[in-house]
Image (tube, rainbow, N blue to C red):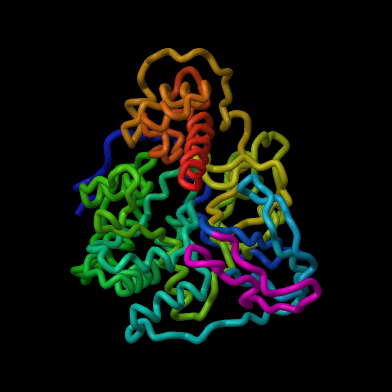
Amino acid sequence: MGLLSKVKSFKGGVHPAEWKELTKNLSFEQMPNPNLVIIPLAQHIGKPANPIVKKKDEVKAGQIIAEAEGFISSPIHSPVSGIIKDIHRENTVSGFPKDSIVIQSSESNEVDLMDILNPETITPEEIRQRVKAAGIVGQGGAAFPTFVKLSPPEKTKIDCVILNGCECEPYLTRDDRYMIERTQDVVNGLKLIMKALGVKKGAIGIENNKSEAISKIRAAVKNQNDISVEILQTKYPQGAEKMLIKAVLDREVPPGKLPMDVGAVIQNIGTAIAIYDSVTKGEAQITAAITVSGGGIKQPKNVIVPVGTPLKDVLDFCGGVKDNAVKVIVGGPMMGVTQFDFGAPVMKATSGILVLTSAEVNAHPETPCLKCGKCIEVCPLGLVPTKLARFSQLERYEDAENFGITTCMECGTCTFTCPANIPLVQWLRLGKQKVLTLQREKKSA
């Protein structure tokens, strides 16, 4: 079957320059432990983890150092062996300071592992408990505790698990490399997810610019009647949950609803790998697979780094920053966060570190809206970004709510395509946050 056959997609979206050639053919490298790691207690959606260690305690790599605080939370493990240096607030790659555990690394390579479990005989409940104990969170960006996704409400009917192999953000290639280098582990991770949910149908969605990954995954599932490989158009944001469900299953997730409300659960390629490793190797989630790329980094790489590694240490491992670099982004260029502190640490869901030059940033001054409608054409959720941004600017939050601002997933397609260079997504993000705050205040009143 040709790679261009039965290509699926969704309405809207954009196709930015890909820039993936910088790292697409580079195998993962393992970065040595840094001298110091900074472990934020909030590396996931939900409540921050609760520290169970104190200053001057000795810890081993893999040892739990913070427990989950409530259902939507996740435990945190030490990525290195060493001494607890302090517990205080530190800047993070999210742009906000968070309570963090700071660990001074030792020379010990000892790792505290959990018991190895048999993937053939493991029960669904044992999978869920292992995923919870390993502190696994989604690696597709939102960092939702994976245990929660594997524990849908009792009456919710899930009939399909989709692995997101789109990796539609420019520059990023870590998921592509995972599918190429650990093909069978990706498939086995999907099987564990399906088993945990009691689902008989699985799909792996891959954009059609990843020919080697498609070929390898197809070969790995050729005798699996319950797992399909879905070839998707190379377009942003193809990997967003609602877009992926529309493309693969032709189902639409209503505003305010979750994928499981239409019978689907989405997991990232890296999350499937983490689940497989937690079961078959007893490993907690203490590393992050990231792409370090851009015209401003001397040696672009795909690299496995300990969670908590300061950005500056990763950049040094990649040869350092060139003189013509003007911006560092954590994540992809569409939804990533520009960095102001290179001491901020890599987190569980960090997917990339981009060092960009002025030619790549391509900044232009903002001009008045041209009323061209391009942002409306490309919005994958059918919103009217110019109107919502204007409501946000004018602080007309009730109007913004009525026009669906809370539906916005902040993908940035509107900003990318705007010929007037209006920072639409920033205004949408601000307005959305304000509307959500007002909604919470009404509920508590």
Residue 263: % across, % down: 25, 58
Q: Position of residue 236 (x, y in %)?
A: 38, 39
| Depth order, front residue of 175/348 | 348
**Total marks placed:** 0
Name the residue located 37 percent from the left edge and 22 percent from the top edge.
374
Would residue 327 be counted in the magenta stretch? no
Residue 183 higher or lower than 360, as above or below: below
Which residues are the magenta region?
47-74
Residue 47 in the image: state x and y as whole percent: 55, 60
Q: Residue at x 60, y 69 (%)?
A: 76
List x then y, in percent, for residue 386: 42, 22
Dividing the image into 4 quarters, which one contains the N terminus?
bottom left
Q: Is residue 19 visible?
A: no
* Any part of residue 434 in sight: yes
Per the picture, the main secondary structure of the magenta-coloured stretch is loop
- Residue 384 vs residue 285: left or right? left
Taking the spot 33% from the left edge, 36% from the top edge, the residue there is 381
Residue 327, image quadrant: top right
- Taking the image as shown, residue 70 lies to the left or right of residue 84, namely left
**Quadrant assignment, res 255:** top left
Report which quarter residue 237 is drawn in: top left
Q: Is residue 151 left or right of residue 156?
A: right
Image point (25%, 54%), residue name? 262
Q: Is residue 425 above or below residue 78?
A: above
Query: Which residue is nearer to you in this view: 348 or 236?
Result: 348
Relative to 155, is 193 on the left or the right?
right
